[in-house]
């Protein structure tokens, strides 16, 4: 196997070069062969009439004039020569390449590469060579290299490696996938990835490896999912469907079709014998809490307890109140947060332990050692990205393999959801309840601040409230951003004394934050100046204004989350983005925000503008590093790979059919499985 051969088996690679290759993560012949170019210098020779203005072009022409060389400044030169290309006179200009003069003889053919000026019929030359370019060299591979390894040496070594070991590249995909998807065999695709004969063959080779990479990843995810499910057999709930239907019928509002679909998925999970591991995505205000409540009620009818864990105390209190309204006397609900102490806490813990409490709502206080459930069957974790993996595991362990639903109001693009949560089932509420008024969003420049603040004052005089968001707590020398403390002071001076302005930021203690938030929720504060700590959770239906300073500093998803803090009552709400973006990306963000209220559409735009690493934050994204695949561009291939992986695992073909043997070995060799035999 090529994975067992050291890289020194390639002719011309000694110990010194092998050491430098090791620093690049290349230790074996297989590692070397699968170190793909990150781009190609394309030298496609097209007729002049087909070349776009300012495009990088390759021209082959005959030198028809004596080269003219002039010097200016220190060590700067300009060399011009006329070439005849396709019977057209073209001026070729060489900057700081005086040596080229002696290579440009009248009557000789020359190939020049550079930027094409359609209006002047001129090319600014970056590279040239005498004679015509060889047809097979039209796509020159460019590799990411370290140390003293030159590009020329690496290309030469790659040719050597392909000549010596290319025939040993084994096909890992079953034959029918190659035929159905019209993709080349692995060995042929590898050859074309390094030294493509033309653009079309390179495209097919890339398509092959994009699919292979995504399929291998999805197979790992689906196999891990199968393992988890089978480890939690015997978890079925015997629910009372009549009671559940009656509970849904008496709700004071009509459920959307999206909510009904998710409820169906949820109830199926609860009654099947495997442990539920589901992510529920829903935009702010889409009605996730009601779906969660129906799931909790279903668990109660099966004689189980339910738990809802949220990141903050004030959010826990709001959920507690809304669940009490929904359930009435149908369930005993208990609130457990850090503030519940002494006798009260003891009483509530006793209720939970004896199952006198059906539902427990709380913060991370739910996972403390003194909390014991009698029969915890269903756990909901809201804004799951706010809790660490360990915290979520501890809550799971409080029950005997309880069903778990993770909820998030951060719309995650489908491609990232499939990739990041590949071992989970994903449900989406992509429809807003009837009658909800969309938040009107406007983009204002800094010089319009007075007009904006007068508009805020008008809303406050009508009895409404406003959020004002700023990016930083205190001034940074590097970033010219007005900070929360300054803005708080300025707004106190701008508004009359009867308008109370509060301040909240990340450096306040949790109890101080909760106190400020309570004052705002009870309309004791009319304006809340805050950093993004206000982003998730609290429901203040009376707040109709969201003003965001330096809005260009935020990503689309974060802006949308902030906008979602308003528009929760009956009155029309507004979001004003105060921004003066310098770059096109920043301006594009502002435009998109004013055009759509759809969080999923925005998240897709955000992914395109910022890339997957920045979407979650590079450090905690947990996204795999793909060599060829791109999560933004290759979403169709990702969908196909996931569908195929699910089919292979669920049908059992992956484990039993001999034509899948090589694919199975490729997965077993992955460090995740540590050589474990998959069955």
Image: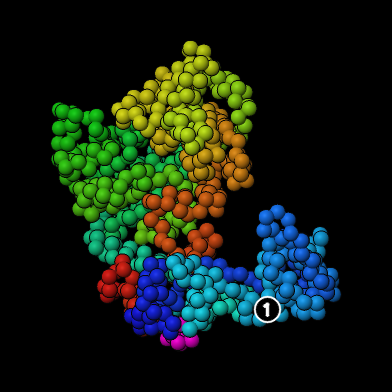
Is residue 59 shown left or right of residue 459?
right
Q: How did the renderer colour the structure?
A: rainbow
- Up the image or down, 367 lies above or below 185; here it is above
- Asked if one can make out residue 206 in the rendered structure from this viewpoint, the answer is no
Residue farthest front in this picture: 74
At x 53%, y 63%, the residue is 634
Q: Dividing the picture into quarters, in which one does residue 225 lie?
A: bottom left
Residue toward you, 515 or 68:
68
Residue toward you, 569 or 614:
614
Report if residue 28 lies within the magenta region: no
Residue toward you, 463 or 233:
463
- Up the image or down, 23 lies above or below 620; here it is below
At x 17%, y 36%, the residue is 349
Crowding near the residue tagged with mark 1, few <14, some 14–19, many ≥20 C-alpha atoms within 10 Å: some
Is residue 124 shown left or right of residue 254?
right
For the N terminus, give its image quadrant: bottom left
* Rendered location of residue 270, percent (x, y): 31, 54
Magenta: predominant secondary structure element? Answer: helix
Secondary structure beneath dot 1 equals loop
- Asked if one can make out residue 71 in the rendered structure from this viewpoint, the answer is yes
Q: Dividing the picture into quarters, in which one does residue 645 lie?
A: bottom left
Magenta residue span: 161-168
At x 40%, y 45%, the residue is 408
* Rendered location of residue 624, percent (x, y): 41, 61
Q: Which residue is mark 1?
A: 133
Is residue 645 shown left or right of residue 480?
left
* Rendered location of residue 178, percent (x, y): 50, 79
For the C terminus, give its image quadrant: bottom left
């Amino acid at each position: 196997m090529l994975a067992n051969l050291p890289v020194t088996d390639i002719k011309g690679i000694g110990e010194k070069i092998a050491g430098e290759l090791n620093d690049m993560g290349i230790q074996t012949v297989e590692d070397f062969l699968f170190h793909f170019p990150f781009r190609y210098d394309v030298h496609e020779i097209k007729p002049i009439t087909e070349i776009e203005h300012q495009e990088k072009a390759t021209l082959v022409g005959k030198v028809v004039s004596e080269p003219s060389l002039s010097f200016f400044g220190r060590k700067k030169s300009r060399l011009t020569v006329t070439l005849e290309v396709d019977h057209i006179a073209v001026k070729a200009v060489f900057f700081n390449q005086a040596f080229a003069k002696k290579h440009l003889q009248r009557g000789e053919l020359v190939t020049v590469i550079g930027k094409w000026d359609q209006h002047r019929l001129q090319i600014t030359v970056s590279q040239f060579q005498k004679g015509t370019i060889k047809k097979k060299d039209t796509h020159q591979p460019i590799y990411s290299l370290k140390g003293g390894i030159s590009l020329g040496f690496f290309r030469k070594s790659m040719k050597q490696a392909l000549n010596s070991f290319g025939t040993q590249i084994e096909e890992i995909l079953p034959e029918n996938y190659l035929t159905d998807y019209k993709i080349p065999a692995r060995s042929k695709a590898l050859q074309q990835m390094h030294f493509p004969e033309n653009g079309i063959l390179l495209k097919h080779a890339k398509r092959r490896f994009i699919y292979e990479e995504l399929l291998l990843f999805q197979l790992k995810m689906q196999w891990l999912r199968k393992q988890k499910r089978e480890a939690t057999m015997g978890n079925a709930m015997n629910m009372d469907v009549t009671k559940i239907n009656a509970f849904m019928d008496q709700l004071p509002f009509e459920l959307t079709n999206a909510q009904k679909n998710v409820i169906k998925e949820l109830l199926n999970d609860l009654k099947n014998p495997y442990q539920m591991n589901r992510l529920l995505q829903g935009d702010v205000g889409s009605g996730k809490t009601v779906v969660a409540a129906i799931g909790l009620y279903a668990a109660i009818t099966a004689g189980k307890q339910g738990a809802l864990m949220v990141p903050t105390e004030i959010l826990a209190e709001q959920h507690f109140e809304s669940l009490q309204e929904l359930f009435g006397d149908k369930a005993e609900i208990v609130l457990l947060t850090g503030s519940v102490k002494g006798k009260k806490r003891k009483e509530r813990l006793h209720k939970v332990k004896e199952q006198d409490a059906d539902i427990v709502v709380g913060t991370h206080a739910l996972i403390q050692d003194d909390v014991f459930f009698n029969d915890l069957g269903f756990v909901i974790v809201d804004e799951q990205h706010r809790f660490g993996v360990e915290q979520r595991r501890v809550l799971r362990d409080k029950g005997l393999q309880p069903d778990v639903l993770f909820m998030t109001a951060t719309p995650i693009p489908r491609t990232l959801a499939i990739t990041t949560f590949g071992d989970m089932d994903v449900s989406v509420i992509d429809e807003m309840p009837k009658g909800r008024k969309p938040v009107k969003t406007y983009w204002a420049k800094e010089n319009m601040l007075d007009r904006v603040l007068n508009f805020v004052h008008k809303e406050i005089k009508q009895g409404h409230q406003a959020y004002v968001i700023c990016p930083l707590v205190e001034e940074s020398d590097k970033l010219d951003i007005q900070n929360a403390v300054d803005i708080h002071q300025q707004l106190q001076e701008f508004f009359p004394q009867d308008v109370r302005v509060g301040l909240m930021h990340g450096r306040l203690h949790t109890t101080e934050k909760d106190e400020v938030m309570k004052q705002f929720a009870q309309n004791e504060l009319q304006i809340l100046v805050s950093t993004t700590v206000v982003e998730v959770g609290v429901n203040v239906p009376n707040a109709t204004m969201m003003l965001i300073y330096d809005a260009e500093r935020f990503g689309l998803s974060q802006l949308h989350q902030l906008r979602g803090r308003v528009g929760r009552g009956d009155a029309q709400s507004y979001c004003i983005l105060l921004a003066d973006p310098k770059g096109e990306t920043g301006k594009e963000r502002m435009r998109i925000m004013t055009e759509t209220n759809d969080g999923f559409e925005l998240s897709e735009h955000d992914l395109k503008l910022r890339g997957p690493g920045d979407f979650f934050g590079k450090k905690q994204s947990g996204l795999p590093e793909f060599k060829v695949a791109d999560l933004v561009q290759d979403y169709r291939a990702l969908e196909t790979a996931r569908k195929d992986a699910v089919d292979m695992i669920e049908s059992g073909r992956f484990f039993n059919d001999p034509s899948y043997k090589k694919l199975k070995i490729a997965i077993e060799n992955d460090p995740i499985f540590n050589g474990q035999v998959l069955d």
